[in-house]
Amino acid sequence: MSAGAKVRAMLPPVTPLPLVGEGDPAGARVLVDLDAIARNYRRMDGYRRSGRFGVVLKEDAYGLGLEPVARRLRREGCGVFWVADFPEGVRLRALLPDVEIYVLSGLTGHPASEHAAHGLVPVLASMAELEATAAAGVRVRVGVMIDGGLVRLGLTDAEATALAGRPDVWARLDVACWVTQLAWFERPDDERNLAQLQRLRAAIAPLPEAPISIACSAALFMDPSLHGDLLRVGSALYGVQGTPGYPQPVEQVIEATAPIIRIVAVGEGTPVGYGGGHVTRRPSRVATIGIGYATGLPVAMADRGAVAIHGRRAPLMGRLSMNLATVDVTDFAEDEVRPGDFVEITGRTISLAEMAASAATVSNEVLVRLGRTLPRLYRGA
């Protein structure tokens, strides 16, 4: 049984519900199933062994729409959210006045006092941000990032050690949480995950006591000691399988589709697409679909990826155009595939993981790309 089949076997059947949203009903679109997001939320919360459950809404809820996703999760009882930057935090605060909101990417040009005015908690991303905030003269609530091994954001171990002797700094900061990101989350059984937790505890031991936030989506299914005090669940909530070889009990929450515009029969040896990037090896039927690299398809899928028609895969052929792509439908009967029919880009047949693999990328990129470029429809709004 494939990894995808194992995941589907874990999940209950779904009853279709009416759709709401905007967009050309005859064009490419992405269906966001808010009920599936809610089911993933409840299912994942059942794995929590400690701490409070928080949801990551960064980058417009992974491209699926911050407002509709946040509203639905608030109905499910979620009271802690994490966003990418200050503008996202302001958007979310206008929608939900009664929740905790943490800003993950540091100050991004907005001082901590400005965050505080909107009820946002910035996660300070560097020594410079921490010192500037402490020097501002107004005691504010902040999170502090500790670099756990990504060399991306946060205090180094040496900087954290140096700050142990700076009571003047900590007197001006109200530390809401210590934050780090697991560097090896894709490998749940890697001993470096627990080692990172131990490093974090050692680094903050002489610093002000505050909750630890270390658990990303994958950590929820790992050793319970990695759950920490404040969880940050993101990609798995949106149906992304983030630990290859270790299926997570979550369901895909989007289906992207595109219309067939034209079908043409060509002979063997016919070049297809710019530069003749594909040459047919047999008499073929080529379908042109209304989606391309500007509307969600990664360029690297050309001649590698596939779409699905009636639950069967049909390979992409030739280079992608800006808003068009060509598909080999030779193996389908003429009455099976017609202009105006829709093909599945990702959904029940082609998972995000399969689509991402065909483009040599990660599922999160595919998810955000499709959600941000295609009109969105919602089920369960």
Image: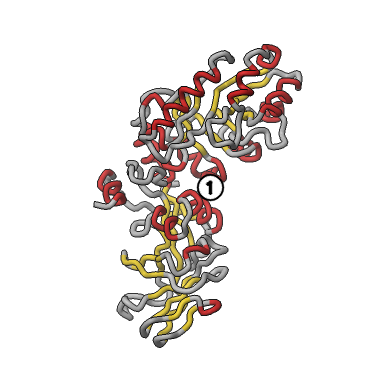
Residue 338 seen in render: yes
Q: Is residue 34 above or below residue 144?
A: below
Q: Which residue is mark 1?
A: 65
Is residue 235 toward the left or the right of residue 4 in the image?
right
Asked whether 36 or 195 is in front, the reply is 195
Residue sticking out furthest to the bottom: 267
Residue 21, given in percent of the width and then of the height, sits at: 50, 54
Q: Residue at x 52, y 51 (%)?
A: 368
Residue at 37% x, 76% y is 329
Type of amino acid at the residue the image marks with label 1: Gly
The residue shown at (42%, 52%) is 254
Secondary element under disc 1, as helix, strand or loop, is: loop
Q: Is residue 40 above or below residue 225?
A: below
Q: Is residue 267 above or below residue 37?
A: below
Locate residue 15, reporting x and y percent: 31, 50
**Residue 204 image offset from top left, x and y in percent:** 55, 18
**Label 1 Cα crowd, 10 Å radius (few <14 / some 14-19 / many 20+):** some
Q: Is residue 6 above or below residue 23?
A: above
Q: Foreground residue, 137 or 94? A: 137
Q: Who is closer to the viewer here, 165 or 19? A: 165
Residue 151: image location, x then y, percent: 58, 36
Question: Front-most of 117 and 214?
Answer: 214
Left or right: where does residue 129 sit relative to residue 270? Answer: right
From the viewer's perspective, is 380 left or right of 205? Answer: left
